[in-house]
Amino acid sequence: MFQTCVCADEPAQGSLSGPQRDPPGPQPFPKPELAMTQSLTLISSENWQEKMEGLTVLRSLAQNHEDTLLPRLRDVCLALVQEVKNLRSGVSRVAVCTLGVLYCHLQRAMDKEVETTARALLHKAAESNAFIREEVDAALGHMVRHCTPARCINAFLDGGLSHLSAAVRKCAAQHLADLLERVGVARLLSGGKDVTDRILPAVVKLALDSSPEPRSFGRRMLLFLSSHRDFDSLLEKNIPTKDLSAARKAVSGLKAKGQGQGLGETPQTPASLPGSGTARASTLQRKLPKPTIAPSPTTTTTATPTNTATTTPREPNSKYSSKPQGPIIEDKAEYIRQLTALLESKDFRERIKGLDQLVADCQHNPSMVIRSLFPVFDLFRDRLQESNRKVNLYALEALQGMVRLLKDNLSGVLNHLVPAIVDNHLNSKNRAVYSAATGALCELVLNLDNSLLLEPFCFKARVLSGQAKVDLIEKVAELVTELYPRRPQLVEQKALPLLWGLLGPSSGSVHRATTSLCRALHNQMGPGLRQSAASQPPSVGKDLNQLLRTMS
């Protein structure tokens, strides 16, 4: 019914057409003015299929009838912004894609609409739907390439860098970094006062961000800007005194480490990904090789999957061989296709090969895994949840190595990954499965920013029962102790409702875990814990006081 969202000068990866060949481009309309009117009418319809048809017409108008579209551009962009927010993911995704087409074909004619449209796109970067996030990323990329840089910079500064969501800040920071690299440091810091006075404070704020991904892009931009001859004086002029020392320290540290890579790349490098992987499955055919990480000298040869439940204590992931076999796949679609063939095979041994392959790729080809993160972890989640116990256990053990290798790059899939780990495995009667699941949770806590884990842990602690509930309450208590000194508001927002729901009569193990959580919160909050309970129903304050008395 609607055509794929492809810009003429650059094919959109992850677009609606997937890996298939794009269909022929849209044909011109014999009566473009009528088509313009009909498209807006269709988009305003309550019927989602009519909305999709209207969006298709808009893309055709942008590509073939620019002079007809431009007089109505404001109305068109306002309509698209509303559909970007549409709760039906299919409509939202096509609206995002349509904005990308407008940026691509109308180019600087879109300048006046950049701020409004970019803000809507950036806010969708926090969307749980991976396909929508891919289209948002593609659309913003077209905006950066085709619209006036100053307009784009202001759109990122106003629409994303101060957002509460780390995913939105990361998206804005990544595209801003790409844009700064295109513009060049001389134009940025020697150009218009409106840009120069805003860009430095924003970059310093990002460089000191509490979340690792935005912070990494911020530090790269800070290092990039520091090459300007007047950087020190501009820094002193534009940065508040309280942040000046931290900014200078960050620049000095970055220069000492030599982190001067291109700004647009993902904030991780293969050299920073420690640990070992698994042997590459011989069934995958490889293309052009590229440099890989040196394998860990402490790894041992691969063990068979049948003895995973009885292996003796070992160094993390030591049963996997880290030696890569064959060159690395370069094409994303081909990589996903071949990995899918393994992980969805009817033969459980092939599925285990696929798990070996994935862990090896996390070490030797991490950029491909990160670029394919959502489809890859959709496949991996199915292996965590499948009924074959051997594959199930193998996936849980493989996950521990993957977490150590990918670290905070897994932040986007945590809301799917945590339930897949805890929903069945923490209440499993099989001790090997339970041990592997708790080991995976421990690796998440050790290797990821714990602020990313607090919400999914709290949610699952509320809704699960049995040993899983106990384990997750205790994990939340650990996170409270670690997070509260730097993220008190987050802890109070997520952990206090969990505590209020746990107060009152409960089984012995749940009561002990609740006591641990209460003690952790009381140690951090002091009298503030009772003050927070005062805003709750009287029974909460009564149960809290009783629990605190038993603790003293």
Image (cartoon, rainbow, N blue to C red):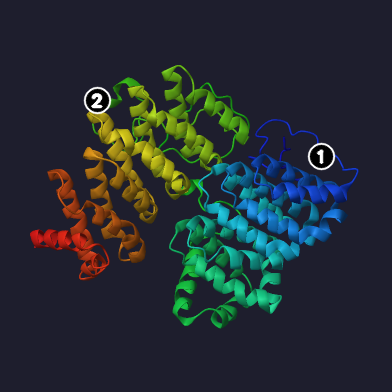
Q: Above or below — where is 449 with respect to 229?
A: above
Q: Is residue 127 left or right of residue 152?
A: left
Seen from the viewer's position, the closer of residues 315 and 198 is 198
Q: Amino acid at mark 2?
A: Thr
Q: Is residue 366 left or right of residue 36?
A: left
Which quarter of the image is occupied by the N terminus?
top right
Q: Amino acid at mark 1?
A: Pro
Q: Above or below — where is 225 with respect to 135?
A: below
Q: Earlier in the sequence, mark 2 or mark 1?
A: 1
Seen from the viewer's position, the closer of residues 117 and 524 is 117
Q: Residue at x 28, y 52 (%)?
A: 476
Residue at the spot of label 1? 26
> Going by the picture, which residue comes out furthest to the front?
46
Image x and y of residue 529, in percent = 23, 66
Image x and y of residue 188, in percent = 67, 71
Image x and y of residue 75, in percent = 74, 59
Residue at the spot of label 2? 310
> Going by the picture, which residue comes out furthest to the right?
30
The total number of labels drawn is: 2
* Mark sitting on residue 257: none
Which quarter of the image is occupied by the C terminus?
bottom left
Seen from the viewer's position, the closer of residues 481 and 402 is 481
Question: Pointer 2: residues within 10 angstroms few (<14), some, or many (20+)?
Answer: few
Q: Residue at x 51, y 35 (%)?
A: 376
Q: Is residue 521 visible?
A: yes
Q: Residue at x 69, y 55 (%)?
A: 79
Q: Is residue 279 visible?
A: no
Question: The residue tagged with tag 2: helix, strand or loop?
Answer: helix
Question: The residue tagged with tag 1: helix, strand or loop?
Answer: loop
Q: Quadrant of residue 112?
A: bottom right
